[in-house]
Structure formats: C-alpha cells, structure tokens
Image (cartoon, rainbow, N blue to C red):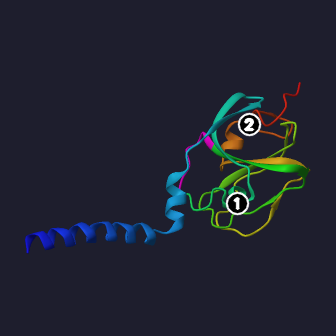
Amino acid sequence: MLSNLLLSRNLIVPALISLLLICIPENFAIAQSHEPTDRLLVLTATGKHTFALEIARTNEERAKGLMFRKSMPQDHGMLFVFHDVRPISMWMKNTLIPLDMVFVSGEGIVTSIVQDTTPLSEEIITSDRPAQAVIEVNAGVAQKIGLAPGDKIRHPLFPITP
C-alpha cells in the first residue's frame, strides 16, 4: 500500500509541475526573462552616457519589443535594428511603461526623438526623418541626458562618424 502511494506521488508531482508550466501565461515569461546582452554609448552635450541594452534584430524580436514589461532600470533600453534606412513606425501596444523613442541613422546619428510615449496606445509613432534603428529607453531619460537630434550613438552596429 505504501509503495503504491509513493509511486502514485512520484507520478503526480511531475504531472502537476508540467501542467503548471503549460498554464503560465506567455507574457509572464516575457516580462521575467530579458537581460541586457550589450552596451551602447550615447554622446550628448552633457557628456557620455552608457546603457545596457537588448537588441531586437529579427521581425519577431522587433514585434515583441518591450511588451508586457512592468519596469526597466533607468540605464537600460532596447535597440531595434532594421535592414534599411527608411521612415520607421512604432507603437506602444501591450507596452506597460512610458518610453522615449530615439530614431537613429545608419551612421549612428540621432535623427529624431519622441518623448514620453503613452503606454498601451495603438497610435502610430513615426520618425521625422529616415532612420535605420530605434532605441527605446524609459520616459524622461532623453531629457535627463540632454539628448538631441545630431547626437552620436556608439555601438558596433554603427560605423564611427567624426
């Protein structure tokens, strides 16, 4: 009797754990699993500012972006890299935190900035000029570091410009 109970328990516990893992919402895993994988340097009139960042290179990574995140450290961000230079459109659908969006040319020059975007909004946010990348940081960071169009971004994905 005791051996049947132990055998039954040994089968039930793994089954319950598996069921629990299957039932966890996908967005829970998204919100908890992202760690910065790279660093980026921003050169402004106020000095050099370093950010830890994740890079969204694929269509799937760009589509997911910072969705479902409840918070992000002030010195973190996400770099969205596109294959060509063009006007870039973004939105805040399923994004829970307000962001500043920094549009960057293929040469690493800031072309435009949209500050303090509205969380969960499906309004389209478009760069003022053609760009090849977007850096998303917490709302208020662009103003805090004095970021402006013409400032330079240093990262291996951008060639060094004078």
Q: Amino acid at mark 2?
A: Gly
Q: Is residue 41 left or right of residue 159?
A: left
Check if residue 72 falls in the magenta segment: yes
Q: Quadrant of the C terminus?
A: top right
- The structure residue drawn at horizontal position 53% and vertical position 57%, both measured from the top left corner, is 31
Q: Residues within 10 Å of mark 1 (few under 14, many from 20)?
A: few
Q: Which marked residue is nearer to the observer: mark 1 or mark 2?
A: 1
Q: Which residue is more in the foreground, 83 or 86?
A: 83
* The residue stretch that appears in magenta: 70-76
Residue 102 visible in image: no
x, y percent for residue 86: 91, 53
**Which residue is label 2 attached to?**
146
Tally the marks: 2
- The structure residue drawn at horizontal position 71% and vertical position 43%, both measured from the top left corner, is 142
Q: Is residue 46 left or right of residue 77?
A: right
**Which residue is label 1 attached to?**
60
- The structure residue drawn at horizontal position 42% and vertical position 66%, both measured from the top left corner, is 21
